[in-house]
Amino acid sequence: MALKWVQTTKFDELRSFLENNLPVDELYLIKPNWFDPRPGSYTSAAVLDLVCNALSGKKIIIEGHSHSRNDLSQKITPENMDDQRDWIRTQEKLYLARTGIDEVLARHNVEYVNITEEFWAGRVVPAKIIQQHVEKKLGPLTYPEFYSFIPEKLYALRGHTLIDLAKIKMCSSTARDFSLSMKNLFGLIPYPSRLKYHTNLPQAIIDIDKLYSALFNIVAVIEGIKEAVVFWEGGQYHTPWSPFDVLKELGLLIIADNLVLADVFCGRLLGQNLLSRTLINLGQQYLGTIDNQILTKAPLLFDTSKI
């Protein structure tokens, strides 16, 4: 597969593209981006429906609770997240209903495994078992507590395809934040608030990527079909870390079996050279190297460096 991409907003063409390029499997895990309700910031019901239609095997959504998958009326922190479990659960149900995602899950008979709920219930694989898998394939983790994050349900499915269904959230000349396929798996850390891992964010992202890469065949699917986020200082929408605007009808979809290459290629399409970023440099050490011949084929679709 290496890397394939297409630019179109026609869903029949997008479905054909996915069907022709995704690996064939009897079961797929799908990690969407359900971080928060802000415009352009989450995997929409329409996109999830598109992906489910393109996959013939059984489908299982995996995601952890978030401090922002709610109406934003309460601030979830490392200090209060355990006390707010019931509110977090209620808000997630409302979020899935409000966005129409629950209807898509029901229509496709998709199972939803909430990583946080499995972790809270203690239904996880002993850390020593996971440690052996990870260190044999990719070396030790910087954060050893991550070894205790794998639910028993998922461990039983190891070896299957994990679709890393990421949203495009790109940096600009006035904001350094970006979130693509590598960052998307950060949501599989089971704590609703992952604030403590932001002190060394690139390494924490690499560790969670290594954890799941050791167990599953991960395929990056990066999309900005109807909406894509660009962080910049003058954006009309706001997050705690950066304002942003939304690019409409970009129609961009990227598939790759190398998360690092997928992210850097996406950056090139949008006018950003991500090769100097710490996350990308760490990723090349553990997750996959960059094929410069592929990068040179990336045209400029929208120049976020001018924002």
Image (cartoon, grey):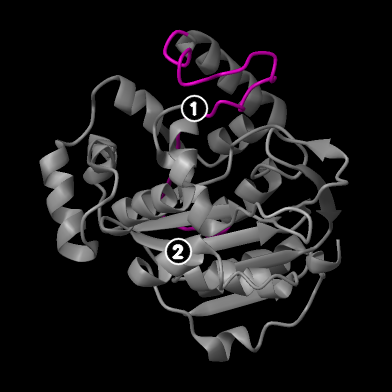
* Residue 98 horizontal side relative to residue 63, left or right: right
User: Magenta-highlighted stretch: main secondary structure?
Assistant: loop
* Residue 23 horizontal side relative to residue 305, left or right: left
Of 251 and 207, which appears nearest the observer?
Answer: 207
Of discs 2 and 1, which sits in the foreground? 1
Say which amino acid is labelled 2: Val
Q: Examine the rendering and report whether any part of residue 10 can be seen.
A: yes
Q: Position of residue 77 (x, y in %)?
A: 52, 20
Of 71 and 236, which appears nearest the observer?
Answer: 236
Q: Which residue is mark 2?
A: 219
Region of the chain picked out in magenta, as a range: 54-83
Which residue: 39% across, 73% down?
A: 288
Q: For mark 1, does the 10 Å Cα neighbourhood hold few (<14), some (14 to 19), or many (20 or more) residues? A: many
Q: Which mark is residue 193?
A: 1
- Name the element at disc 1: loop
Q: Is residue 155 above or below residue 136?
A: above
Which residue: 46% across, 15% down?
A: 79
* Residue 72 horizontal side relative to residue 81, left or right: right
Q: Is residue 80 above or below residue 43?
A: above
Check if residue 81 falls in the magenta segment: yes
Q: Cα distance, mark 2 to mark 1?
A: 26 Å
